[in-house]
Image (spheres, grey):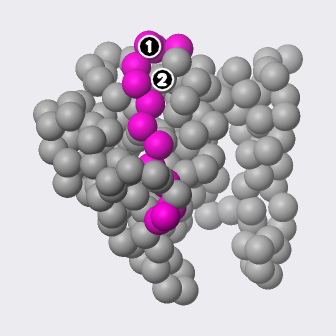
Amino acid sequence: MKKDVKDYIRTIPDFPQKGVMFRDITTVLQDADGLRLAVDSIQQKLAGIEFDVVAGVESRGFMFGAPVAYNLHKPFVPIRKKGKLPYRTVSEEYSLEYGSAVIEMHSDAIAPGARVVIVDDLIATGGSARAAARLIEKVGGVVVKAVFLIELPALGGRELMKGYDVASVVTFEGE
């Protein structure tokens, strides 16, 4: 029986706090078939999209974005947490459930006018995805699509990404 990506995702109740159903992608990564299916499924969401660069959001976006970039012979740009990149950077702050965070990208990583695809493992509230899009736009890039392995629609991330082409491989509705 052929498996779906969702079959490889482990759900851990009450992590990191009571009431949260954590969607664990390590079980996807640990299975060669699961990893191949996840990367291929993300890549399929890019069919027909013209783009120049794949940008992945730290750190799980690297795990899926880099193989997609490799397969499609596109450059890969890491979007990292503040203070992790060695060269000149541009930054974007975004809200978390409690407080805020900052992500950065090298200021010369994306050429003005470059068409960029954002890849990450999960869209929940959409804060990091929107911050990544703004970061790309700060340097003149154009976000043509954002693809996520998992979407949690109840948390409103797609709404925060309104105006962007957003796709996900699997969704966990109200779970």
Q: Is residue 9 left or right of residue 105?
A: right
Q: Position of residue 12 (x, y in %)?
A: 84, 61
Residue found 34% across the figure and 28% down from its top: 53
Q: Is residue 60 visible?
A: yes
Dot 1 crowding, Cα within 10 Å, few <14, some 14–19, many 20+: few
Q: Position of residue 111 (x, y in %)?
A: 20, 34
Quadrant in which residue 6 is drawn: top right
The segment highlighted magenta reads: 71-83
The quadrant of the rendering that contains the N terminus is top right
The residue singled out by tag 2 in the image is 69
Q: Is residue 100 left or right of residue 140?
A: right
Q: Is residue 57 left or right of residue 166?
A: right
The correct choice, above or below, for 96 with respect to 51 in the image is: below
SS for dot 1: loop
The quadrant of the rendering that contains the C terminus is bottom right
Label 2 amino acid?
Ala
- Residue 48 forms part of the magenta stretch: no
- Image disc number at residue 73: 1
- Image disc number at residue 104: none
Q: Is residue 142 visible?
A: no
Label 1 amino acid?
His
